């Protein structure tokens, strides 16, 4: 199974003859450097680039391109070579982007000669950098491994080569760019978006004229992914922002959709309020839009999904759990859940667009009829109003009929999929938790709640986030955050928020292999003792909840030191030199009642952990009221924006910028009177004891 790496993560290479495939949103220069046991490049003869594209055991492209294939034979490298660093750079003077933040995030994959992916890495988070060390293949105790680096350089190739110890780095960088400039006329532009390998068959029953007219839908911009993880990101899609204009209705231009007409693809909603979104970018690529899920494309096609049971003629296919592409059942279920999310988003968007069109058409017909003064008196005006309203009601009824049919099919699929979900994807009321065993491998994703729309509130779609976490989580305990929260007592709301955080922490502990995930808690005033009791009683915390200024400072200093040391080790390529007492497993810091008990230094450390922690395995789970932190002014705004905001009560704060929906988020909860949480934590403790952790 492909290892989808995050920055700093490594993976063992099972073979020595490899291809490294690069995909980018615009032409880039691809090359590679050879390093000795200290990572030093001894001379220009140890660098493969467009001007000298071939070295023993290594061959790179001769020109800038949006896609590259680099050939590597690790056994053919000189004996003194211990490291191969893959570098990417933007060509200069070509009229293209001058920084990686202005183009699609590059994607690199290490594959076998047959195209089978071994490891992949999406280089997210780049901004002003014009050159980047993407991957490194390194020899450790006779075995070769790959590490995701993602180290960018704003000063370009010269700075990157100098950082690897090359003398005359500036001169070589200039010669590389000159060689690229000579071949820019032959450089390869990004390919147009590919058509998906296979669309999920849905809503195909019934004639096309059963659909109501809908207003034109907004089109997505072509862009590869971030949330978390594909081999052709240039064909993936990225949602425009929530401030995108909504579909406008016009009777002369409204299309008549058919069952095969593509609708805008939905995307996981962002954890921010609609008002904080930025304006969308204009489409950047011509040609057909790829509606496939952006994270699940592979160079080699995965096994096909299982066939659905046969249905009566004219009826929709019977739903099947795992009805999506993927290499494993977990991957198929993950893709199927997001497919259900997209189907629900499209169906609701089409219905809302049809209602808007019907209302607009009625208004225009009334305006035309009543523009003649003779129709404003007597029965003529009344008849015009009745006819216009009747047409509107008919259109809305037809739209609702189609929506109900689609929702019924989705509800039937949800009823089949939910019982088949593994523990990481399942709700706390799923029986799978009663037989749960702590896994030995990390799952693809984690369920942090449910999503639904007002068109059918009982149809819940699991909200999944990829693992390892790419951003922290903020459980909003403020009463002013939503209407539902405003109706609750302050103490009860804060207690509920902390209980929600405990459920998230317990789920993370339960899906990570034993000893590979630790939880630290900061509770400055000790106010969350009751909510934290399940974690404390089970003995799964890394230490007692930290209280008081001294406890807060100690935990923050410990985690800040870990982030500093791991970052330095990654940049220096010296992971084996980390102190033996350093826990390199994933860490979660649960913070209660922020900012009470935090001084300015502690606030600065917390911001540092939020910004730098996720890339090296340190994550935040904060329970806080933003209003309480207003005294700090805008200094904490980046902190809130970096976290995924969720609520302890159902609330429609999750903005979906793709189709303009405000999804209602339903937090996780254990069934009343259930002991499932205690059982799961006991299993975590037993698994750690068995593993000697």
Image (cartoon, rainbow, N blue to C red):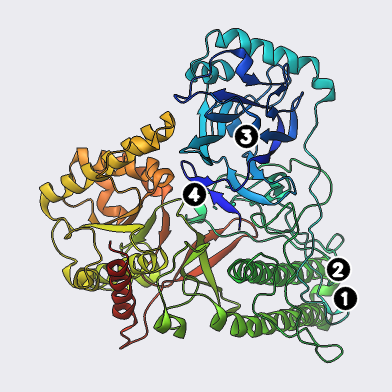
Tell me whether circle 3 and circle 4 mark residues in contact (CB < 8 Å). no
For the C terminus, the image quarter is bottom left
Quadrant assignment, res 679:
bottom left
Could you say whether the residue bearing mark 2 is in a helix, strand or loop? Answer: loop
Could you say whether the residue bearing mark 1 is in a helix, strand or loop? Answer: helix
Residue holding disc 3:
74
- Mark toward the start of the polypeptide (3 vs 4): 3
Is label 3 or label 4 in front? Answer: 3
Instruction: Judge by depth and name the residue closer to the eye, 302 or 411.
Output: 302
Residue drawn at point x = 46 percent, y = 41 percent: 8
Tell me whether circle 1 and circle 2 mark residues in contact (CB < 8 Å). yes
Residue holding disc 4:
276
Task: State the separation of the CA atoms marked 1 and 2.
Answer: 8 Å
Instruction: Judge by depth and name the residue closer to the eye, 207 or 91.
Output: 91
Instruction: Judge by depth and name the residue closer to the eye, 416 or 368.
Output: 416
Residue drawn at point x = 79 percent, y = 60 percent: 197
Is label 1 or label 3 in front? Answer: 3
Task: State the separation of the CA atoms marked 4 and 2.
Answer: 34 Å
Residue holding disc 2:
256
Residue holding disc 1:
208
- Mark toward the start of the polypeptide (1 vs 3): 3
The vertical placement of 208 against 31, above or below, is below
Image position, residue 230 (x, y; %): 66, 51
Tell me whether circle 4 and circle 2 mark residues in contact (CB < 8 Å). no
Residue drawn at point x = 62 percent, y = 33 percent: 102
Classify 10 Å Cα crowding around label 1: few (below 14), some (14-19), many (20 and above): some
Is label 2 or label 3 in front? Answer: 3
Task: State the separation of the CA atoms marked 2 and 3.
Answer: 57 Å
Task: State the separation of the CA atoms marked 1 and 3.
Answer: 57 Å
Task: State the separation of the CA atoms marked 4 and 1.
Answer: 38 Å
Is label 4 or label 1 in front? Answer: 1
């Amino acid at each position: 199974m492909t290892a989808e790496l995050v920055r700093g993560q490594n993976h063992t290479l099972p073979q020595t003859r490899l291809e490294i495939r690069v995909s980018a949103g615009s032409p880039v220069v691809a090359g590679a450097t050879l390093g000795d046991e200290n990572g030093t490049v001894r001379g220009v003869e140890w660098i493969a680039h467009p001007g000298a594209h071939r070295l023993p055991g290594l061959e790179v492209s001769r020109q800038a391109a949006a896609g590259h294939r680099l050939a590597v034979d690790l056994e053919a490298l000189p004996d003194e070579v211990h490291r191969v660093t893959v570098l990417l750079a933007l060509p200069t003077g070509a009229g293209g982007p001058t920084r990686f933040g202005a183009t699609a995030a590059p994607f690199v994959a290490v594959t076998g000669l047959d195209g089978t992916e071994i490891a992949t890495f999406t280089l997210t988070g780049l901004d002003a950098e014009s050159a980047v060390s993407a991957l490194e293949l390194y020899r450790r105790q006779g075995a070769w491994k790959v590490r995701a680096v993602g180290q960018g350089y704003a000063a370009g190739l010269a700075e990157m080569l100098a950082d690897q110890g090359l003398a005359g780095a500036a001169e070589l960088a200039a010669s590389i760019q000159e060689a690229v400039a000579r071949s820019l006329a032959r450089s390869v532009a990004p390919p147009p978006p590919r058509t998906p390998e296979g669309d999920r068959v849905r809503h195909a029953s019934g004639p096309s004229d059963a659909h109501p007219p809908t207003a034109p839908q907004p089109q997505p911009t072509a862009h590869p992914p971030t949330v978390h993880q594909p081999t052709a990101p240039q064909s993936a899609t990225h949602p425009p922002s929530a401030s995108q204009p909504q579909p406008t209705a016009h009777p002369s231009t409204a299309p008549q959709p058919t069952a095969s007409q593509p609708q805008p693809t939905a995307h996981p909603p962002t954890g921010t309020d609609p008002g904080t979104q930025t304006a969308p970018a204009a489409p950047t690529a011509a040609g057909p839009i790829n509606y496939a899920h952006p994270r699940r494309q592979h160079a080699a096609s995965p096994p096909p999904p299982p066939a659905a049971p046969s249905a009566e003629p004219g009826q929709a296919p019977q739903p099947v759990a795992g009805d999506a592409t993927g290499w494993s059942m977990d991957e198929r279920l993950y893709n199927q859940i997001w497919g259900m999310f997209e189907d629900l988003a499209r169906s609701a968007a089409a219905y809302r667009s049809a209602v808007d069109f019907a209302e607009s058409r009625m208004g225009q017909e009334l305006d035309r009829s009543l523009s003649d003064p003779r129709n404003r008196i007597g029965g003529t005006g009344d008849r015009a109003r009745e006819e216009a309203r009747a047409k509107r009601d008919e259109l809305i009824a037809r739209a609702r009929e189609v929506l109900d049919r689609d929702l019924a099919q989705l509800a039937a699929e949800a009823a089949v999929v939910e019982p088949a979900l593994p523990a990481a994807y399942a709700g706390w009321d799923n029986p799978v938790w009663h037989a749960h065993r702590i896994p030995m491998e990390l799952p693809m994703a984690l369920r942090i709640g449910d999503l639904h729309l007002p068109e059918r509130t009982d149809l819940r779609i699991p909200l999944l986030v990829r693992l390892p976490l790419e951003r922290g989580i903020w459980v909003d305990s403020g009463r002013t955050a939503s209407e539902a929260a405003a109706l609750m007592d302050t103490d009860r709301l804060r207690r509920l928020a902390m209980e929600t955080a405990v459920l998230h922490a317990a789920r993370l502990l339960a899906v990570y292999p034993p000893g590979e995930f630790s939880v630290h808690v900061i509770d400055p005033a000790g106010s969350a003792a009751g909510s934290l009791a399940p974690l404390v009683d089970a003995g799964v915390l890394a230490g007692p909840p930290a209280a008081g200024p001294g406890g807060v400072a100690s935990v923050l200093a410990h985690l800040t030191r870990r982030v500093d040391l791991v970052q330095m080790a990654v940049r220096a390529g010296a992971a084996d030199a980390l102190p033996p007492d350093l826990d390199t497993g994933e860490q979660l810091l649960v913070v209660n009642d922020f900012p009470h008990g935090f001084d300015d230094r502690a606030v600065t450390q917390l911001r540092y952990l939020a910004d730098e922690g996720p890339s090296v395995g340190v994550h935040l789970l904060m329970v806080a009221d933003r209003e309480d932190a207003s005294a700090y002014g805008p200094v904490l705004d980046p902190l809130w924006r970096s976290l995924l905001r969720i609520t302890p009560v159902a609330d429609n704060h999750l903005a979906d910028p793709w189709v303009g929906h405000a999804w209602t988020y339903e937090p996780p909860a254990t069934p009343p009177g259930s002991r499932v949480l205690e059982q799961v934590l006991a299993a975590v403790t037993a698994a750690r004891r068995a593993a000697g952790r």
